[in-house]
Amino acid sequence: MASKHQTLEQLIVPTVEALGFVVWGIEFFSQGKHSKLQVFIDSPEGINLDDCEKVSRQVSSILDVEDPISGEYTLEVSSPGMDRPLFTLAHYEAFKGHQVQLKLRSPYEGRRKFKGVITGVENDEVVVQVDDHEYLFAIDLIEKANIIPQF
């Protein structure tokens, strides 16, 4: 049986792609009446408010028909932004050399939060340079990761 995330991807990705955009990532936070579904979209030309509205209407219609989420939830469609979240190994590879802030699902060496520079990807692991130490984190162990914008 498919997980909720897989089911949402199967419904959302083709809908977004049909509108000419790419799904950067999907996050679902189940919190009773305050549950939230976030869909991050991207395109080579960038994303504007009209794009988000168009995608939101289409995705909302599909979700209303298919009803993969029980109960109430809020749908948010946005661009990944400058502090874009990273979801896949390809995202980490594309942002090699950038600073990242990440949080692990469970502690490693007594801590869950790390801030450093992405130096590469090896198999299913992300390589992050933190100060003078290099860490390899399995993609499955990373709960959340965001690029730190450089100004």
Image: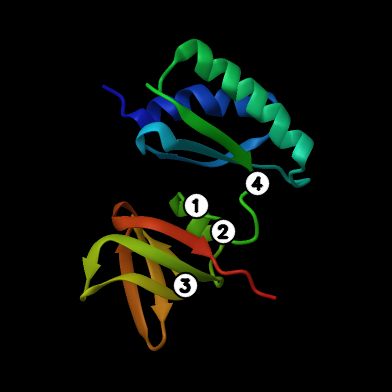
Which residue is denoted by mark 2 in the rendering? 94
Which residue is denoted by mark 3 in the rendering? 119
Q: CA distance from mark 1 to mark 4?
A: 18 Å
Residue at image location 59% in from the left, 16% down from the top? 61
Going from N to C along the chain, the mark reached first, 3 or 4, is 4
Going from N to C along the chain, the mark reached first, 2 or 3, is 2
Task: Mark 1: give few (<14), some (14-19) or many (20+) Cα within 10 Å.
Answer: few
At label 2, the amino acid type is: Ala
Going from N to C along the chain, the mark reached first, 3 or 1, is 1
Residue at image location 32% in from the left, 69% down from the top? 136
Q: Nearest to the eye among marks 3 and 4: give it.
A: 4
Q: Nearer the viewer, residue 45 or 121?
A: 45
Which residue is denoted by mark 1 in the rendering? 90
Q: Are marks 2 and 1 in contact (CB under 8 Å)?
A: yes
Q: Is residue 131 above or below residue 78?
A: below
Q: Are marks 3 and 1 in contact (CB under 8 Å)?
A: no
Q: Would residue 110 appear left or right of 93 to someone viewing this image?
A: left
